Amino acid sequence: MNIINFTPLPAFIGGTVIGLAVVLFYIGNGRLAGISGILKNFINSNDKKLDNLLFLFGIILGPLLYSFFSKSEIPFSITINIPTLIIGGFLVGVGTSISNGCTSGHGICGISRFSARSILATIIFVVIAIITVTAIGRFF
C-alpha cells in the first residue's frame, strides 16, 4: 500500500462537497446530477438548455479556477495512445447510453437514493472495470 496517496481528510472533504453539490442541484433543478444525462439533455433537448450548459461549463471551469487561485499545478498525463483513448471514450458513451447513466449518476445519485437499478449498475461498472484493467495488463 502506498501511504503517500492515503489522504482521508481531503477525500472526505471532496466527497462532502460532491454530495452537497448533488443535493443543491436536485433542489434547484428537480433532477439528478448525472453528467451523462446532463450532456444528453443538452444535446437532445431544448428543456433547461442554459442550466445544462452552465453545469457542463462548471465541470471544466472548476479545476481551472482551482489551479489558478491555489497556484498549484494539477498533474495530468495521458499514458495511452490516442486510438485506444478514442475507442475507450466511444465504449464509455455506449455503456452510459445502455445503462441510462454513468458512474456519477448511478454511483453518487442513485445509490444515495437506494435505487436497486443504480446499485446493480454500479456493481457492473466496477466488475467490468476490474476485468478490463486485468485484461489490458495481461495482453498489452
Image (spheres, rainbow, N blue to C red):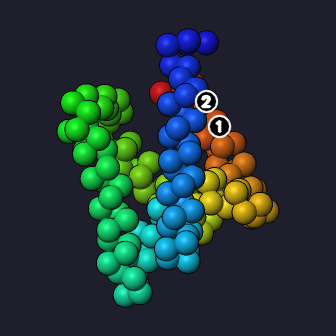
Task: Tell me which residue sits at (35%, 63%) in the image.
Answer: 56
Q: Is residue 29 above or below residue 82?
A: below
Q: Is residue 138 above or below residue 50?
A: above
Nearest the camera: 19 or 52? 19
Nearest the camera: 41 or 91? 41
| Quadrant placement of the N terminus | top right
Q: Which mark is residue 116?
A: none
Residue 130 located left or right of residue 136: right
Residue 139 can be seen in this image: no
Nearest the camera: 89 or 55? 55
Look at the numbered disc 2 and give the secondary structure of its residue. helix
Look at the numbered disc 1 and give the secondary structure of its residue. helix
Quadrant location of residue 128?
A: top right
Task: Tell me which residue sits at (44%, 77%) in the image.
Answer: 41
Q: Which mark is residue 134?
A: 2
Task: Tell me which residue sits at (64%, 49%) in the image.
Answer: 125
Instruction: Give the Cα separation between the discs numbered 2 and 1.
Output: 5 Å
Give the residue at mark 1.
131
Residue 68 rendering spot, x and y as whole percentages: 20, 39
Nearest the camera: 35 or 95? 35
* Residues under numbered marks 2 and 1 in contact, where contact means CB atoms less than 8 Å apart: yes
Residue type pointed to by label 1: Ile
Residue 33 rendering spot, x and y as whole percentages: 52, 64
Residue type pointed to by label 2: Thr
Residue 87 rendering spot, x and y as whole percentages: 41, 50
Residue 97 located left or right of residue 78: right
